Image (cartoon, rainbow, N blue to C red):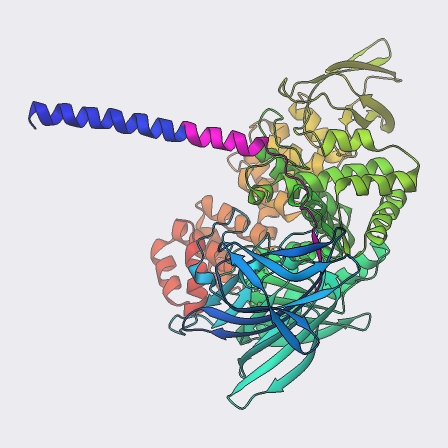
Amino acid sequence: MNKKFLKYTVLSLVTLACQNMQAQNAEKEKDKEQLAIYRATPLKVHDLVNTKLEVSFDYGKRHMYGKEWLTLKPHFYETDTLTLDAKGMDFKEIAIVEGTKKIPLKYRYDTEQLFITLNRKYKNAEKYTVYIDYTAKPDELKVKGSAAITDAKGLYFINPDGKDDKPVQIWTQGETEASSAWFPTIDKPNQKTTSEISMTVEAKYTTLSNGKLIGQKANKNGTRTDTWKMDLPHSPYLFMMAVGDFKIFKESYNGKEVSYYLEPKYAPYAKQIFGKTPDMMNFFSKMLGVEYPWGKYAQIVARDYVSGAMENTSATLHGEYVQKTERELLDENGESTIAHELFHQWFGDYVTAESWSNLTMNESFATFGEVLWHGHDAGQDAEDRSRYEKLQNYLYSSKNGISPVLARFHYKDKEDLFDNISYSKGSIILYALKNQMGDAAFFKSLNHYLETNAFKSGESHQLRLAMEEVTGKDWSPYFNQWYYQGGNPILNIEYGYANGKVTIAVKQVQDSSVQTFSLPLKVDFYVNGTKIRKDILIEKREQNFSFDVAAKPDFIDMDSDKIVVGQILDNKKVEDYLYQYKNAPSYYNRIEAIKFATNDKSRDAQVILLAGLEDQQDELRSLSIAAIDLDDSQIKVAALKSVLNIAKKDKNTTARAAAIIKLAATGDVIYKELMNESIKNQSYNVIAAGISGLTKLAPDEAAKALTTLDEDTKKHVTPLIKK
């Protein structure tokens, strides 16, 4: 390389680095500007009234041909203009409908919005109908999604040419504002409209949309037109269509059809996948005091879906992960998601967040619904496990107690709101509120919020006002702390005992930029075999409490109801964790004891893990199996009996697989028979564990065993095998 070229290269690199830095700084400034913008609730110039669509599909071009009759009225002020969201469309005709006549209208279009000049001024008592003949071209849109919803083109053609090894399907995804990629509308969550959608499809296909199927018409060209009607108002982002080869399994709840749409291969397992749905509908209806509000409830599974699932009104769409065979269901099911999407039919569909800033009114509640369902279905311990998992999800997203606000009126992009704040943190904030308020008052408040705002939109202030009306108490301090300020408390606790008094020193050690929290908590003192409960209110950065007790407590359980949306650092020793596991055995206390024991090699830690092998929760059994020290001869004798029992009989296949692998890790060939028996099991988890174990004990036999598996089993098992 000559010096001149080297000099030029160095200068180029320096220039490039400067340009990159300038670009990064510009991007940061842009982010700051966007975060400074107050995201107001969308202005209502018009109200949607009814949306009628007639659509057909061009699989080759990936186009949808649509005719729309959109009925609106001015919200308050009279107006002669109409602005609609319509992304990437071609327009053939736009007209006002008067009787049997169509009067052409002038319009302007910028590829995102359609600006229509009406034929005259309309007052807010006047409804009018605009007719639009258009073509939607979703595959030609340049759009971006988010971590939660990875794409935003609204309408999706799956394998339209039939060349791939997957079904031919069409489905839609409206959240956040992508319905306007397949029909012109006012694509905002605070709009509500009834709807009627007629889909012309090949006669061999099944369709699904919102509301009820009110008509099917066979056409001469081998197509069929299905008409679905929703006669209750719902938001545009909750509109849906799906087309494909689906088999339908039907049952009912309270006289309403409950149906499951699956690919033919999975149709025999519909009841096993979705069968708890009617029980969920009954539980949520009674708990909220509002009967399931829609005319039917359908669930459909789509290929290549861009999110986990979507709560379209009366017709939830699931990603393919929920679609499983009987064998796959032995290892995993989608029950949490099924409950989450169903709860949205009240919180999100019946009453909708009036802006994306208020997404908590949809997603926090649906996540909260998951927690309550697990408690109803499997008991308090399962409920506590679910909310503990939500807490850990949230804490993973925070640092030093710093995290975004729950009700976020300042954000860079609305898609950023679909995070662990809106989902997990919001759900446990609701649970803590339920604890403070009491179940009767809390659920009466939810009922009041739903009934007051039925078929409309709502925000967190309306929830607060409903709670205040029911309870007679001002809940502003709670909402100000948890909804309108961010972060979480981190409590450092020191305990002392002297002269018949227990002392508790509390410091809030979250980052200084984070608020000081007010936390009403319960504390349990275990003294001479008796539990004594006391109430405390933590409301300062540093605070001391003292209590008279008969003797030094054996154990102190801070926040015994486990409602702190944050962290407690109480500097426990291993003997404290052993005591709490055995004597204060809430799910929180048990898992925290086991998690501590996994990093401690003391005898007491091993005793905790030994007890954990018999825990009612499979996750805790699995953690204990992985961590218990079989090199400890005394522990080994007791542990092997439990681990072997789990390996042979446990109903949970994850715990069973963990036990099989643990036994194989001993290197004892006595377990070869167990490995071979495991390979004959129906569970893919158990089979994979058997082969993994056999690989350690007899590698040649393991390789041979793998070749004897059928192709389906081999496909599922191979990724699970631990080398």
Q: What segment is highlighted magenta in the picture?
A: 25-50
Residue 138 image offset from top left, x and y in percent: 47, 62
Please indicate, yes or no, whether residue 311 appears anywhere in the rendered image. Answer: no
Q: Residue furthest right?
A: 472
Q: Is residue 261 above or below residue 512?
A: below
Q: In the shown orientation, is residue 646 left or right of residue 669?
A: right
Residue at 66%, 18% in the rendered image: 509
Which residue does the image show at 82% across and 17% down from the upper left? Answer: 552
> Is residue 106 inside the magenta stretch?
no
34 or 600, nearer to the observer: 34
Tell me the residue at 65%/28% (across/down): 487
Q: State whether residue 572 is above or below residue 125.
A: above
Res 215 seen here: yes
Whether residue 36 is in magenta: the answer is yes
Q: Quadrant of residue 307?
A: bottom right
Question: Which residue, as the protein is rendered here, is positioned at the far left?
Answer: 2
Measuring from the top left, give residue 291's x and y in whole percent. 83, 61
Identify which residue, 262 or 96, lies in the foreground. Answer: 96
Which quadrant of the rendered structure holds the N terminus? top left
Closer to us: 565 or 314: 314
Residue 235 placement, left or right of 686? right
Q: Position of residue 122 (x, y in %)?
A: 73, 59
**Among all residues in the image, which is located at the extreme bottom?**
220
Residue at the extreme top: 499
